[in-house]
Amino acid sequence: MSRRTAALASVTALALGAAASASTGRLMDETPSAAGPTAQARSAALGRCMIGGGLGVQMSEGIPTGPGYARSTGTVRALNLMVDFSDAPGEGRALDRLGEFFPQTTDWFRTSSYGRVDYRPEAPVQDWLRMPKPFKKYGIERGAPFDPGYRELVDDIVATADPDVDFAAYDLVNILVTPNAGPSALDTVLSVTFAGNHEAPVADGVPISNASFVYSRQDDGSGSYDQTGYRVLPHENGHVFGLPDLYTQDGGGAVGHWDIMSEDWGANNDLLAWHKWKLGWLDDSQVDCASASGTTEHLLTPLARTGGTKLAFIPLTKKTGYAVEVRTRAGNDEAVCRPGVLIYRVDADVDTGHGPITVSDSTRDSGGCTRSPNVHAELSDAPYAPGETFRDRDTGVRVTVAGADLDGNYRVHITRPKD
Ligand SMILES: [Zn+2]
């Protein structure tokens, strides 16, 4: 088993802990942090494509995202607190720890959202915030639920920071723990987010309901930490915006490197178009809903480029469907080695960490086209090229890549049998 596989397995265990705590969240009637997309008016034409999950799903791929998560468009104010302990004292300046994540995280969100997220990191406390108890007293380990350890930690963070911080002024909280607290991320990834948790401790009148915790450095020793080490934070913040984990117990084999919620080590990557629509980074007019029977043609522009149609969605049931998009090596996508049409199944009834999205591999068992470290190789050449066809035998749905033009736009033919 590779080191990376071990790391991914640990992350999975953690995600389940986070999901479990998210379930304790309750909807508030009037929440100032209701997810942005919720409020958007939806065109009737997209109705069948707005799939949703059942009530038992804690963190769903469904659209719209439920209330309680941080807003995902416009100005997003992020409170950053650098935390240390008597048995894990911060090494170096706390602001240097902040510098491991910024400005890269801000840039990542600006690029991925086409400028729709104005992410403002603030650090009103510039020194290490020393917790009253040693790290080991909080019982933080992988998969730890919110209660009791994290509640205790959040209580102590609030009490220690409150004289200098107006918690009500922020949309989300990043707790950047000193990297020497807890195990190496190469062995166990502790980083976790508790999202939409309205039973969280209250500070300055607001619950600390969307908080990401980042621990040991995700440094694979390849010498790229300065460029890639920040990527755990956009992943964790993805949860505060309502996105589920796409990796499973088996690691990144379901989605590969096509979304930062699947793999956040190694070369930079973007989000799937489905996630961008869910977050409100794509307008409804940039989504084609292929719900009619027969064959329809769709012109898709590369996901990394601003403007144009980005997503064709083929609803199968009220909870599932296929998504079709164009991925190229541009923007936040650094590791794309076979540009083309990416096709994946979305199941809004499958929970975080259990494989809500599955990418269809156009070249099964090929071994992939990348040797980039920490990039799931097999799915790296998953996109379909002109002349190739995806077929779903169960439903009779067909997607044919009819052609690509010189600007990198793809023509796609979607065929679905009569309902
Ligand atoms: Zn996660």
Image: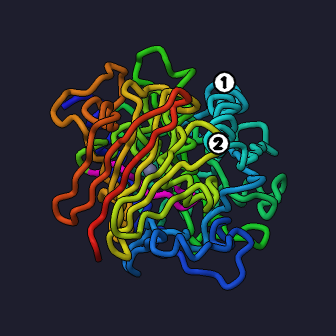
As measured in the structure, the alpha-carbon distance from the residue carrying label 2 to the one carrying label 1 is 27 Å
Label 2 vs 1, first from the N-terminus:
1
Q: Nearer the viewer, residue 171 or 337?
A: 337
Residue at x 55%, y 80% (from the top left corner): 26
Residue sticking out furthest to the bottom: 29
Looking at the image, residue 162 sits to the left or right of residue 133; the answer is right
Residue 340 quadrant: top left
Identify which amino acid the numbered label 2 is placed on: Phe
Looking at the image, residue 325 sits to the left or right of residue 92; the answer is left
Looking at the image, residue 28 sits to the left or right of residue 387; the answer is right
Task: List x then y, in percent, for residue 120.
Answer: 77, 45
Q: Is residue 353 visible?
A: no
Q: Nearer the viewer, residue 295 or 340?
A: 295
Task: List x then y, in percent, for residue 363.
Answer: 22, 34
The answer to if 245 sits in the magenta stretch is: yes
Identify which amino acid the numbered label 1 is placed on: Gly
Q: How is the image coloured?
A: rainbow
Q: Is residue 56 above or below residue 64?
A: below
Query: Residue at label 2?
Result: 109
Segment colored magenta:
239-248
Q: Nearer the viewer, residue 370 or 198?
A: 370
Q: Depth-wise, is mark 2 or mark 1 nearer the camera?
A: 2
Q: Residues within 10 Å of mark 1 (few under 14, many from 20)?
A: few
The N terminus: image quadrant: top left
Query: Residue at label 1?
Result: 92
Where disc 1 sits, the SS reads loop
The answer to if 318 sits in the magenta stretch is: no
